[in-house]
Image: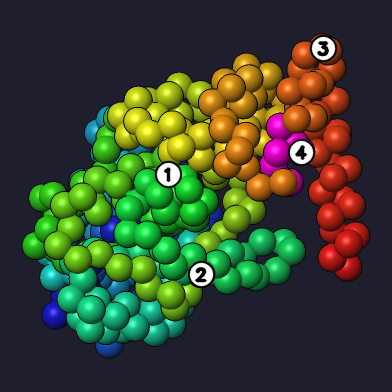
Protein backbone atom coordinates (compact mmCIF):
# COMPACT_ATOMS: atom_id res chain seq x y z
CA UNK A 1 0.00 0.00 0.00
CA UNK A 2 1.32 3.43 -0.98
CA UNK A 3 0.19 6.70 0.60
CA UNK A 4 0.17 10.07 -1.20
CA UNK A 5 0.08 13.32 0.79
CA UNK A 6 -0.80 16.46 -1.21
CA UNK A 7 0.21 19.85 0.21
CA UNK A 8 -0.47 23.20 -1.56
CA UNK A 9 2.15 25.82 -0.72
CA UNK A 10 2.49 29.57 -0.94
CA UNK A 11 5.32 31.43 0.81
CA UNK A 12 5.66 28.54 3.21
CA UNK A 13 9.43 28.02 3.36
CA UNK A 14 9.70 29.47 6.88
CA UNK A 15 7.47 26.77 8.41
CA UNK A 16 7.05 23.91 5.90
CA UNK A 17 9.85 21.79 7.39
CA UNK A 18 7.81 21.12 10.55
CA UNK A 19 4.86 20.10 8.39
CA UNK A 20 7.00 17.71 6.33
CA UNK A 21 8.55 16.23 9.47
CA UNK A 22 5.09 15.47 10.83
CA UNK A 23 4.23 13.57 7.65
CA UNK A 24 7.47 11.59 7.76
CA UNK A 25 6.77 10.57 11.35
CA UNK A 26 3.17 9.57 10.68
CA UNK A 27 3.86 7.75 7.39
CA UNK A 28 7.17 6.08 8.22
CA UNK A 29 5.65 2.57 8.37
CA UNK A 30 4.34 2.86 4.81
CA UNK A 31 5.52 3.39 1.28
CA UNK A 32 4.64 7.06 0.82
CA UNK A 33 5.14 10.20 -1.23
CA UNK A 34 4.67 13.87 -0.43
CA UNK A 35 3.63 16.15 -3.29
CA UNK A 36 4.07 19.89 -2.77
CA UNK A 37 2.38 22.16 -5.31
CA UNK A 38 3.64 25.73 -5.11
CA UNK A 39 1.44 28.63 -6.25
CA UNK A 40 4.15 30.88 -7.73
CA UNK A 41 5.77 31.84 -4.40
CA UNK A 42 8.65 34.32 -4.25
CA UNK A 43 10.44 32.00 -1.80
CA UNK A 44 10.35 28.95 -4.06
CA UNK A 45 14.15 28.64 -4.13
CA UNK A 46 14.24 28.31 -0.34
CA UNK A 47 11.37 25.85 -0.57
CA UNK A 48 13.23 23.77 -3.14
CA UNK A 49 16.25 23.60 -0.83
CA UNK A 50 14.08 22.23 1.97
CA UNK A 51 12.43 19.72 -0.36
CA UNK A 52 15.83 18.47 -1.53
CA UNK A 53 16.55 17.35 2.04
CA UNK A 54 13.09 15.82 2.56
CA UNK A 55 12.75 12.10 1.67
CA UNK A 56 10.02 10.98 -0.75
CA UNK A 57 9.10 14.59 -1.47
CA UNK A 58 8.38 16.18 -4.86
CA UNK A 59 7.93 19.88 -5.60
CA UNK A 60 5.67 20.96 -8.46
CA UNK A 61 5.94 24.62 -9.46
CA UNK A 62 2.87 26.07 -11.15
CA UNK A 63 3.52 28.30 -14.14
CA UNK A 64 0.58 30.58 -13.38
CA UNK A 65 -0.79 31.68 -10.00
CA UNK A 66 -4.34 30.57 -9.24
CA UNK A 67 -5.59 29.21 -5.91
CA UNK A 68 -5.22 26.34 -3.46
CA UNK A 69 -8.06 24.38 -5.09
CA UNK A 70 -6.15 24.23 -8.37
CA UNK A 71 -2.95 23.31 -6.51
CA UNK A 72 -4.69 20.45 -4.73
CA UNK A 73 -6.18 19.16 -7.98
CA UNK A 74 -2.74 19.14 -9.60
CA UNK A 75 -1.31 17.21 -6.66
CA UNK A 76 -4.24 14.77 -6.65
CA UNK A 77 -3.76 14.14 -10.37
CA UNK A 78 -0.06 13.40 -9.88
CA UNK A 79 -0.57 11.13 -6.86
CA UNK A 80 0.45 7.50 -7.38
CA UNK A 81 -0.66 6.04 -4.03
CA UNK A 82 -3.72 3.94 -3.31
CA UNK A 83 -4.88 6.47 -0.68
CA UNK A 84 -4.62 10.26 -0.89
CA UNK A 85 -4.32 12.47 2.19
CA UNK A 86 -4.61 16.26 2.08
CA UNK A 87 -2.71 18.65 4.33
CA UNK A 88 -2.30 22.43 4.46
CA UNK A 89 1.25 23.73 4.61
CA UNK A 90 1.02 25.04 8.19
CA UNK A 91 -0.80 22.07 9.72
CA UNK A 92 0.65 18.82 11.10
CA UNK A 93 -0.21 15.14 11.16
CA UNK A 94 -0.04 13.53 14.59
CA UNK A 95 2.10 10.45 14.98
CA UNK A 96 0.03 7.37 14.16
CA UNK A 97 -2.65 9.36 12.31
CA UNK A 98 -2.18 7.73 8.91
CA UNK A 99 -2.38 4.20 10.31
CA UNK A 100 -5.46 5.05 12.38
CA UNK A 101 -7.22 6.64 9.38
CA UNK A 102 -6.41 3.75 7.03
CA UNK A 103 -7.83 1.33 9.59
CA UNK A 104 -10.96 3.48 10.00
CA UNK A 105 -11.54 3.64 6.22
CA UNK A 106 -10.97 -0.09 5.74
CA UNK A 107 -13.14 -1.10 8.69
CA UNK A 108 -16.08 0.98 7.47
CA UNK A 109 -15.44 0.52 3.71
CA UNK A 110 -15.35 4.30 3.15
CA UNK A 111 -13.97 5.79 -0.06
CA UNK A 112 -13.91 9.31 1.44
CA UNK A 113 -13.34 10.54 5.00
CA UNK A 114 -12.79 13.69 6.97
CA UNK A 115 -12.72 14.06 10.70
CA UNK A 116 -11.84 15.54 14.05
CA UNK A 117 -8.84 17.80 14.60
CA UNK A 118 -6.94 19.73 17.26
CA UNK A 119 -6.91 23.53 17.05
CA UNK A 120 -3.57 24.98 18.13
CA UNK A 121 -3.51 28.65 19.10
CA UNK A 122 -1.86 31.02 21.53
CA UNK A 123 -4.59 30.09 23.99
CA UNK A 124 -3.58 26.42 23.90
CA UNK A 125 -4.93 23.30 22.19
CA UNK A 126 -8.54 22.19 21.83
CA UNK A 127 -10.00 19.11 20.16
CA UNK A 128 -12.97 19.56 17.81
CA UNK A 129 -15.04 16.41 17.28
CA UNK A 130 -18.14 17.11 15.20
CA UNK A 131 -19.69 13.82 14.10
CA UNK A 132 -22.58 14.44 11.66
CA UNK A 133 -26.09 13.91 12.98
CA UNK A 134 -27.59 13.77 9.47
CA UNK A 135 -25.78 12.41 6.41
CA UNK A 136 -26.51 15.47 4.30
CA UNK A 137 -23.48 17.73 3.89
CA UNK A 138 -25.52 20.93 3.63
CA UNK A 139 -27.46 20.03 6.75
CA UNK A 140 -24.20 19.20 8.54
CA UNK A 141 -22.60 22.54 7.60
CA UNK A 142 -25.49 24.98 7.76
CA UNK A 143 -28.08 23.47 10.12
CA UNK A 144 -25.88 21.52 12.53
CA UNK A 145 -23.34 24.38 12.20
CA UNK A 146 -20.37 22.00 12.05
CA UNK A 147 -17.26 22.06 9.88
CA UNK A 148 -14.81 20.25 7.65
CA UNK A 149 -11.10 21.04 7.50
CA UNK A 150 -9.14 20.16 4.39
CA UNK A 151 -6.20 18.80 6.38
CA UNK A 152 -8.42 16.00 7.73
CA UNK A 153 -9.50 14.71 4.30
CA UNK A 154 -8.46 11.32 2.90
CA UNK A 155 -9.90 9.23 0.07
CA UNK A 156 -9.24 6.32 -2.24
CA UNK A 157 -7.07 7.30 -5.20
CA UNK A 158 -9.30 5.25 -7.52
CA UNK A 159 -11.92 8.00 -7.05
CA UNK A 160 -9.58 10.91 -7.78
CA UNK A 161 -11.13 11.66 -11.17
CA UNK A 162 -14.42 12.34 -9.36
CA UNK A 163 -13.21 13.80 -6.05
CA UNK A 164 -12.00 17.19 -7.24
CA UNK A 165 -11.94 20.70 -5.81
CA UNK A 166 -14.05 23.40 -7.45
CA UNK A 167 -11.42 25.78 -8.82
CA UNK A 168 -13.98 28.56 -9.32
CA UNK A 169 -14.19 28.98 -5.54
CA UNK A 170 -11.75 31.43 -3.98
CA UNK A 171 -13.15 30.65 -0.53
CA UNK A 172 -15.21 27.86 1.08
CA UNK A 173 -13.33 25.31 -1.03
CA UNK A 174 -13.51 22.62 1.65
CA UNK A 175 -17.29 23.08 1.99
CA UNK A 176 -17.70 22.77 -1.77
CA UNK A 177 -15.49 19.69 -1.80
CA UNK A 178 -17.60 18.03 0.92
CA UNK A 179 -20.87 18.72 -0.89
CA UNK A 180 -19.57 17.59 -4.28
CA UNK A 181 -17.78 14.51 -2.94
CA UNK A 182 -20.58 13.32 -0.65
CA UNK A 183 -22.93 13.30 -3.64
CA UNK A 184 -20.63 10.92 -5.55
CA UNK A 185 -19.18 8.87 -2.71
CA UNK A 186 -20.17 5.23 -2.35
CA UNK A 187 -19.65 5.47 1.42
CA UNK A 188 -18.27 8.47 3.28
CA UNK A 189 -17.55 8.82 6.97
CA UNK A 190 -16.43 11.04 9.80
CA UNK A 191 -13.40 9.92 11.81
CA UNK A 192 -13.85 10.99 15.46
CA UNK A 193 -10.15 10.59 16.31
CA UNK A 194 -8.35 14.01 16.24
CA UNK A 195 -5.37 13.10 14.10
CA UNK A 196 -4.32 16.52 12.75
CA UNK A 197 -3.07 19.67 14.48
CA UNK A 198 -4.32 22.88 12.85
CA UNK A 199 -2.47 26.18 13.25
CA UNK A 200 -5.15 28.81 13.95
CA UNK A 201 -2.89 31.83 14.47
CA UNK A 202 -0.96 31.90 11.21
CA UNK A 203 -1.44 35.28 9.49
CA UNK A 204 -3.65 35.25 6.43
CA UNK A 205 -5.79 32.18 7.08
CA UNK A 206 -8.87 32.52 4.90
CA UNK A 207 -11.32 31.83 7.73
CA UNK A 208 -10.39 35.18 9.31
CA UNK A 209 -11.11 37.28 6.23
CA UNK A 210 -14.19 38.49 4.41
CA UNK A 211 -14.60 37.91 0.66
CA UNK A 212 -18.11 38.84 -0.40
CA UNK A 213 -17.74 37.89 -4.05
CA UNK A 214 -16.42 34.45 -3.16
CA UNK A 215 -19.31 33.92 -0.74
CA UNK A 216 -21.84 34.94 -3.38
CA UNK A 217 -20.31 32.49 -5.87
CA UNK A 218 -20.57 29.68 -3.33
CA UNK A 219 -24.16 30.52 -2.42
CA UNK A 220 -25.25 30.67 -6.06
CA UNK A 221 -23.72 27.30 -6.90
CA UNK A 222 -24.47 25.28 -3.77
CA UNK A 223 -27.39 26.73 -1.79
CA UNK A 224 -31.11 26.74 -2.65
CA UNK A 225 -32.93 25.91 0.59
CA UNK A 226 -33.59 29.13 2.58
CA UNK A 227 -32.61 27.30 5.79
CA UNK A 228 -29.19 26.47 4.33
CA UNK A 229 -28.77 30.05 3.10
CA UNK A 230 -29.67 31.31 6.58
CA UNK A 231 -27.15 28.94 8.17
CA UNK A 232 -24.43 30.09 5.77
CA UNK A 233 -25.23 33.75 6.52
CA UNK A 234 -25.22 33.10 10.27
CA UNK A 235 -21.64 31.83 9.97
CA UNK A 236 -20.56 35.15 8.42
CA UNK A 237 -22.53 38.06 9.85
CA UNK A 238 -20.61 38.24 13.16
CA UNK A 239 -17.27 38.15 11.33
CA UNK A 240 -18.52 40.96 9.07
CA UNK A 241 -19.34 43.02 12.17
CA UNK A 242 -15.96 42.35 13.78
CA UNK A 243 -14.21 43.37 10.56
CA UNK A 244 -16.39 46.51 10.40
CA UNK A 245 -17.62 45.50 6.94
CA UNK A 246 -20.98 47.26 6.84
CA UNK A 247 -22.06 46.02 3.41
CA UNK A 248 -21.20 42.41 4.24
CA UNK A 249 -23.07 42.62 7.54
CA UNK A 250 -26.21 43.92 5.83
CA UNK A 251 -25.98 41.26 3.11
CA UNK A 252 -25.68 38.35 5.52
CA UNK A 253 -28.03 39.69 8.19
CA UNK A 254 -30.81 40.13 5.62
CA UNK A 255 -30.57 36.44 4.69
CA UNK A 256 -30.83 35.06 8.22
CA UNK A 257 -34.03 33.42 9.46
CA UNK A 258 -34.13 34.65 13.10
CA UNK A 259 -36.23 31.71 14.27
CA UNK A 260 -33.30 29.41 13.46
CA UNK A 261 -30.81 31.34 15.60
CA UNK A 262 -29.70 30.33 19.07
CA UNK A 263 -30.39 33.05 21.69
CA UNK A 264 -26.82 34.38 21.64
CA UNK A 265 -26.82 35.02 17.89
CA UNK A 266 -30.39 36.30 17.93
CA UNK A 267 -29.31 38.94 20.45
CA UNK A 268 -26.32 39.93 18.32
CA UNK A 269 -28.51 40.26 15.23
CA UNK A 270 -31.14 42.35 17.03
CA UNK A 271 -28.47 44.67 18.42
CA UNK A 272 -26.64 44.92 15.11
CA UNK A 273 -29.75 45.61 13.06
CA UNK A 274 -30.87 48.28 15.54
CA UNK A 275 -27.48 50.01 15.49
CA UNK A 276 -27.52 49.86 11.70
CA UNK A 277 -30.96 51.52 11.52
CA UNK A 278 -29.93 54.41 13.76
CA UNK A 279 -26.61 54.95 12.00
CA UNK A 280 -24.38 53.58 14.76
CA UNK A 281 -23.14 50.37 13.16
CA UNK A 282 -19.59 51.43 14.07
CA UNK A 283 -20.41 50.62 17.72
CA UNK A 284 -21.21 46.96 17.01
CA UNK A 285 -17.60 45.66 17.00
CA UNK A 286 -17.04 47.33 20.39
CA UNK A 287 -20.26 45.78 21.72
CA UNK A 288 -19.17 42.34 20.51
CA UNK A 289 -15.77 42.80 22.15
CA UNK A 290 -17.46 43.61 25.46
CA UNK A 291 -19.75 40.58 25.08
CA UNK A 292 -16.77 38.28 24.52
CA UNK A 293 -14.91 39.75 27.50
CA UNK A 294 -17.91 39.12 29.79
CA UNK A 295 -18.23 35.56 28.45
CA UNK A 296 -14.54 34.90 29.24
CA UNK A 297 -14.98 36.23 32.78
CA UNK A 298 -17.94 33.92 33.35
CA UNK A 299 -15.86 30.94 32.28
CA UNK A 300 -12.89 31.84 34.52
For label 4, the residue is 267
* First-in-chain label (4 vs 1): 1
Asked if residue 265 is among those painted magenta in the image, a careful observer would answer yes
The label shown at residue 129 is 2
Q: Nearer the viewer, residue 251 or 68?
A: 251
Which marked residue is nearer to the observer: mark 1 or mark 2? 2
Outermost residue toward the front? Answer: 259
Residue 64 seen by the camera: yes
Secondary structure category for the residue under label 3: loop
Secondary structure type for disc 4: helix
Mark 1 nearby-residue class (10 Å; few <14, some 14–19, many ≥20): many
Q: Which residues are magenta?
A: 264-269
Q: Say which label, 1 or 3, has the lower sequence index.
A: 1
Q: Is residue 82 left or right of residue 179?
A: left
Q: Position of residue 131 (x, y in %)?
A: 44, 67
Q: Residue at x 43, y 82 (%)?
A: 95
The residue to which callout 1 is attached is: 10
Q: Which residue is mark 3?
A: 279
Which numbered mark, 3 or 4, is in the foreground of this view?
4
Residue at 37% over, 42% down:
173
Q: Earlier in the sequence, mark 2 or mark 4?
A: 2
Q: In the image, is 144 to the left or to the right of 112?
A: right
Amino acid sequence: MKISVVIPTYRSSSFIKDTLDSVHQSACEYDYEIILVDDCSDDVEALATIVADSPNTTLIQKEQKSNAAASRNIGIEQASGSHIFLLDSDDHFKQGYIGERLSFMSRNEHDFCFGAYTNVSLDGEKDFIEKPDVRDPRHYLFIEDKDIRTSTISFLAERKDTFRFNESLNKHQDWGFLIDTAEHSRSWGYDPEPGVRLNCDRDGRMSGSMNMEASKVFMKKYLVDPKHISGFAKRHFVLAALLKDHDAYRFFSSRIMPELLRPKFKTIKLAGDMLDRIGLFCLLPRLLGTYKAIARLKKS
